[in-house]
Image (tube, grey):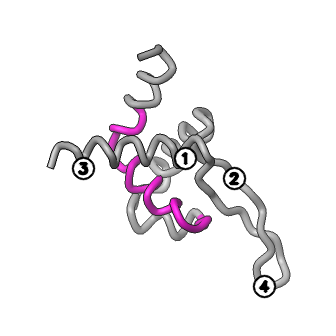
Amino acid sequence: MGYGKLRILNLVLQPYVLEVLRELKNNPKRFKELQKFVKNERTLSLKLAKLQDYKLVEMTHLKTDGKYVNFYMITNLGKEVLTAIEDIKLSKS
């Protein structure tokens, strides 16, 4: 396993990261919506920044009620990582 993959694995195993990826799996979400899983705003901001640094999540602007709003969405790489982690968990059962 390469150094980059180990860094991603280390990130994904940190508290709240898998919950955020799972929540973004099907639909983009606003920051406020993600706070259901990570109550502390600073912690959520830091996790989202790291996920963006690793290209697992990206921020996009979507039009809602006539104005553009920031949303977070999982990337293809993020989906691959989430699927791999979930496959590992399933194989342990």
Q: Amino acid at mark 4?
A: Asp
Find disc 2 in the rendering and name its residue.
59
Say whether disc 2 or disc 4 marks the residue closer to the N-terminus.
2
The numbered mark, 1 or 2, whose residue comes first in the sequence reads: 1
Residue type at mark 3: give it: Leu
Q: CA distance from mark 1 to mark 3?
A: 26 Å
Which of the two discs, 2 and 3, labels the residue nearer the N terminus? 2
Spatial CA distance of label 1 from label 2 is 9 Å
Determine crowd level at label 2: few under 14, some 14-19, many 20+ residues with C-alpha closer than 10 A: some
Left or right: where 72 falls relative to 80: right
In the rendered structure, are the residues bearing label 2 and label 4 in contact, judged by CB atoms less than 8 Å apart?
Answer: no
Most distant residue in the front direction: 91
Quickly name the residue at label 3. 90
In the rendering, at what x and y percent does residue 80 appear? 51, 43
- Which residue occupies the foreground of this view, 70 or 6? 6
From mark 4 to mark 1, how far is it between C-alphas? 25 Å
Where is residue 70, by image quadrant? bottom right
Neighbours of disc 1 within 10 Å: few (<14), some (14-19), many (20+) = many
Residue at position x 39%, y 31% in the image:
9
Q: Are marks 1 and 3 in contact (CB under 8 Å)?
A: no
Magenta residue span: 11-30
The answer to whether mark 4 and mark 1 are in CB contact below 8 A is: no
Say which residue label 4 marks. Answer: 65
- Left or right of 27 on screen, residue 2: left
Q: Is residue 68 above or below residue 17?
A: below
Q: Residues within 10 Å of mark 4 (few under 14, many from 20)?
A: few
